[in-house]
Image (cartoon, rainbow, N blue to C red):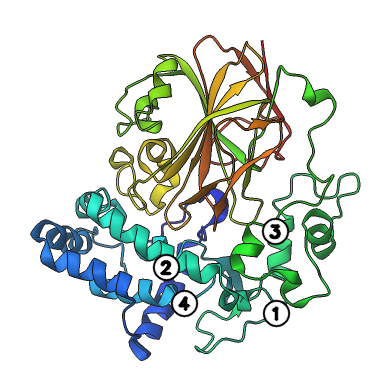
């Protein structure tokens, strides 16, 4: 059975055959050289065996995979062994039979089929499981922030202790640089070079003459910043009525009828503001028929957040949440959280930043950074009382981040500019700090 689906952000390959081969080689790797379990993985394993409901959930999620889907991962013990291996590896491009792809969600990849089952839904909405997963993902985050992760920041094949089970290539190889450049919405325009290497050097702060282009770790590379002048708010967009893009991102959805409380797990995944805002006291200043603009980020681009308006930071909050839960209303689907972006706005690990705009027509608004799967580390870099100008930094995802929302109160009428697109799963990046709307 051939299941090929476009995946937003390109965190996982759209070609299922490529992903199957990657998983096959991963299983062969852990079988040939099983590593001692990381204590965080061991802790999750013990929790599964010590809780009858969790044991049932993690066992049944593999039993419930529909016939014909041919998941190579047959049980949660294999799942844990692969997760254990991944904690010591950096994301890279893989070559398999002349194909090249990024498996940027490696843990998501091995859960791809199991997540959509009833057992998977029960397991990955469980609070204890998500607490254990947070510890596991923090272990990987620590590795990705260490110099040991810089081995993937090279030009050409990667030299690593394990066999090149996926023929990995570094992030400064021609293939990877081309993939990064292809996500630049301004590539080849004005002074922005078309050539992939020159495009990277022009856009991002780096030191091409130094090892790893001067980046100290994978995380240092991933949270890279634009060079001064590359992405700036234009003079015309400094007008207080203009709202600019908070992330380099592609428009996914925009509604003007979001309710304070709604059945966000149902078909259509309506927004439920109280749930998105984790019942924060400031949520009461919003109301039914609020506006929500949601956009998703690509694995290969800029992952810092910038203020969409001029104003004062009123409150901030990091909200713990789920990592691998997907909307049950979407049915059994290999795309994981792909079609569940509205749903995860209410449940996933996320960061809330409430901003009081200088423009009274906007007033209080909320920026929400939403993590997905492995990429759920949200770092807020502003504090209550800080004043921010449009385009000023607010924070960053570490190793990615799936999507973000801008929430406006009822009565704030915005003429949105989607740059010639209709919000959907198949859109392209709008530059960060570019105009995305004008308040009327």
Instruction: Compute the Cα span from label 1 to label 3.
Output: 15 Å
Instruction: Give me the residue at 54% from left, 58% from top.
Output: 399
Q: Is residue 209 left or right of residue 9?
A: right
Instruction: Kindly report which numbered mark, 4 or 2, lies closer to the viewer in this rendering.
Output: 2
Circle 4 residue: 88
Circle 2 residue: 139
Instruction: Give me the residue at 42% from left, 62% from top.
Output: 138
**Quadrant (top left/top right/bottom left/bottom right) for the N terminus:** bottom left
Q: Quadrant of residue 406?
A: top right
For marks 4 and 2, the one nearer the N-term is 4
Circle 3 residue: 180
Vertical placement of residue 231 versus 314, above or below: below
For marks 1 and 2, the one nearer the N-term is 2
For marks 1 and 4, the one nearer the N-term is 4
At which x and y percent is residue 315?
50, 31
At which x and y percent is residue 96?
55, 76
Instruction: Compute the Cα span from label 1 to label 4.
Output: 20 Å
Q: Secondary structure at mark 2?
A: helix
Instruction: Give me the residue at 67% from left, 70% from top.
Output: 171
Q: Residues within 10 Å of mark 1 (few under 14, many from 20)?
A: some
- CB under 8 Å between callouts 2 and 3? no
Q: Is residue 66 visible?
A: yes
Instruction: Compute the Cα span from label 4 to label 3.
Output: 24 Å
At which x and y percent is residue 74?
25, 71
> Which one is in front, 69 or 198?
198
Q: Secondary structure at mark 1?
A: loop
Instruction: Kindly report which numbered mark, 1 or 4, lies closer to the viewer in this rendering.
Output: 4
Q: Is residue 375 left or right of residue 71?
A: right
Q: Is residue 173 visible?
A: no
């Amino acid at each position: 059975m051939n299941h090929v689906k476009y995946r937003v952000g390109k965190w996982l390959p759209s070609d299922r055959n490529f992903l199957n081969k990657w998983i096959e080689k991963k299983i062969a790797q852990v079988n040939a050289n099983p590593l001692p379990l990381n204590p965080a993985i061991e802790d999750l394993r013990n929790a599964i065996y010590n809780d009858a409901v969790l044991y049932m959930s993690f066992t049944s999620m593999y039993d419930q995979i529909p016939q014909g889907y041919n998941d190579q991962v047959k049980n949660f013990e294999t799942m844990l062994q692969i997760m254990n291996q991944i904690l010591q590896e950096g994301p890279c491009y893989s070559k398999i039979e002349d194909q090249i792809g990024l498996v940027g969600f490696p843990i998501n990849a091995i859960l791809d089929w199991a997540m959509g089952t009833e057992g998977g839904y029960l397991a990955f909405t469980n609070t204890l499981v998500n607490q254990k997963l947070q510890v596991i993902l923090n272990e990987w985050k620590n590795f990705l922030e260490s110099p040991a992760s810089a081995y993937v920041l090279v030009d050409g094949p990667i030299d690593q202790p394990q066999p090149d089970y996926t023929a990995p290539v570094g992030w400064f190889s021609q293939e990877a640089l081309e993939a990064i450049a292809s996500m630049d919405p301004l590539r080849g325009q004005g002074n922005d070079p078309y050539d992939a290497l020159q495009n990277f050097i022009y856009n991002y702060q780096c030191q091409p003459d130094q090892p790893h282009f001067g980046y100290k770790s994978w995380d240092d590379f991933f949270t890279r910043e634009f060079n001064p002048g590359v992405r700036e708010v234009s003079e015309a967009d400094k007008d207080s009525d203009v709202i600019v893009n908070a992330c380099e991102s592609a428009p996914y959805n925009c509604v003007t009828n979001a309710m304070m409380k709604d059945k966000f797990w149902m078909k259509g995944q309506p927004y439920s503001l109280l749930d998105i805002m984790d019942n924060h006291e400031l949520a009461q200043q919003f109301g039914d028929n609020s506006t929500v603009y949601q956009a998703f980020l690509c694995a290969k681009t800029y992952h810092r957040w910038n203020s969409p308006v001029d104003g004062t930071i009123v409150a901030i909050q990091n909200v713990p949440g789920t990592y691998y839960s997907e909307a049950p209303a979407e049915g059994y689907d290999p795309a994981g959280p792909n079609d569940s972006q509205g749903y995860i706005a209410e449940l996933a690990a996320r960061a809330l930043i409430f901003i009081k705009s200088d423009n009274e027509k906007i007033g209080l608004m909320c920026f929400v950074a939403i993590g997905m799967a492995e990429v759920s580390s949200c770092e807020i870099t502003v504090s209550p009382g800080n004043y921010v100008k449009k385009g000023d930094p607010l924070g960053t995802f570490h190793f990615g981040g799936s999507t973000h929302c801008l929430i406006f109160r009822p009565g704030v009428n915005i003429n949105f500019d989607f740059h010639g697109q209709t919000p959907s799963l198949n859109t392209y990046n709008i530059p960060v700090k570019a105009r995305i709307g004008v308040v009327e």
